[in-house]
Image: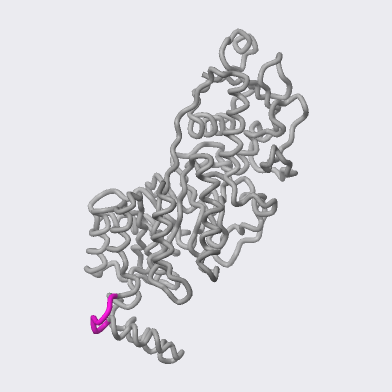
Amino acid sequence: MLLIYTHKITPRFSYIMKQIFENTLGVEIGYATKVEDFIKHSGPKMTYTKQPLQNEFFVRSNDLLFEQGINDVPISVLDWDGTPCFFGTDERSNVPFDVFAASFYLLSRYEEYLPHVKDVHGRFSPKDSVAYQNNFLHKPVVDIWAFKLFAQLQERFPELEGGIRNYRYTSLLDVTTSHCYSHRGVVRGISGLALDLGTFKLRRVVERLAVWLKLRKDPYDNFSQLISWHRENDVKSIFFFQFADYSKYDKNVSINNNNFKSLIKYIADYSTVALAASYTSFNHEDVLRKEKTNLEGVINRDVTSSRMRYNRVDVPETYRRLMAAEFTDDYTMGYSHEIGFRASTCTSFAFYDIPLEIQQPIKVHPYAVHDYALSTLKREGEVSLRLNLVYDEVKNVSGSFRTVFSNELLGSSERLEWKTIYKTVLKNYHV
């Protein structure tokens, strides 16, 4: 056990120590606030305060973990043996920065509480993040810091043991449009045909008619192939189905369509089914509850995981609504158009609600790659390079690599063969 001395145990302190030592490193920890208890401890120990007590392992504390609320915290990025860091300390500290305060800042999404300009969908821009601005968005620095810290602790205390952590890959599949032409109703079908004709999209006209006449399969209906590839590569997958009423941003097949319901039941036999929450539900807890209940009625089991439409996360309100609707896990923590780690970690973590100063009972599972960020690339080689960059970072810390693809993009081949790319992802990154 590692004994940690500090002058005050706060909810922030307890939260980040548990995440770093227990959840990430698998190290058993205990706390001491009395100097005499700390001094008489004969095992591995560390001081986290302003000044060391003796010659123990010492990390000089920033004030962040002992404050409440949000303050405009100055950030000055430093270098720790090739890894960016911030909240620098003095020469007495065994670590050149407050690794715990910096980790809390990133995991709690502290910067997203600060004044910023949201985009048209109410989202925090990656360009406003300290990670993007200092060129470490592609690095899970919280995990990197943790393992570097552990290595230094083991130098001082060779008897200190950590847990065994294994790399994992999970494929997240967004199904916000299950079919391109099929099962969409007569009115929507004819309207779509008229729009294609009016905009001279003749390829879509031919494709649409071929699907209607059952001469070819709907391009978005690639589910049996995806399931087959997942089983072949022993890949864990989660399918997020939108099960919502029609609206400006929610245009899936009707929730009353029996073919759509059958598809969801089929997927549930082979994979986890979760909710792709609608655009409308973002500000309406009652709508979120209704969508969850309706989807549960189709698969006859609890739906506990979610993803928000367009990756909309507004801290802390989004997570409070998800908890109120009885979700336990969320997979929205990431950026749509930038590859990398929004919370600078590839390890799942509990959400910390800063205004309430409490760890909430919902787990956040960050993803590193969204297919929107790949869809602007022009060559398969570029896609591979970008994917390998983050895969290598996750692999180096034995973390969890999560990617988000949609059946919609996988059914498209206008510029790149996305199904071929996805099959390669499964083959290369599942181990």
Is the magenta region chiefly helix, strand or loop? Answer: loop
List x then y, in percent, for residue 360.
48, 39
Residue 313 vertical position relative to residue 353 in the rendered view, above or below: below
Residue 61 image offset from top left, x and y in percent: 69, 29
Note whether 39 is above or below 109 in the view shown: above
Please, which colouring scheme is shown?
A: one colour
Q: Nearer the viewer, residue 363 or 204?
A: 204
Q: Give the residue drawn at x 53%, y 64%.
A: 381
| Residue drawn at (44%, 91%) of the image | 200
In the picture shown, does residue 426 fall above or below 355? below
What segment is highlighted magenta in the picture? 212-217
Q: Residue at x 46, y 89 (%)?
A: 199
Queried whether the magenta region covers residue 192, the answer comes back as: no
With 234 as the anchor, is 159 left or right in this view? right
Q: Nearer the viewer, residue 94 or 354?
A: 94
Q: Position of residue 234 (x, y in %)?
A: 32, 49
Query: Left of 419 or right of it: where is 17?
Result: right
Residue at the right extreme, as displayed: 91
What x and y, as percent, mark residue 219?
Answer: 34, 74
The residue depicted at 23 percent of the width and 69 percent of the height is 259
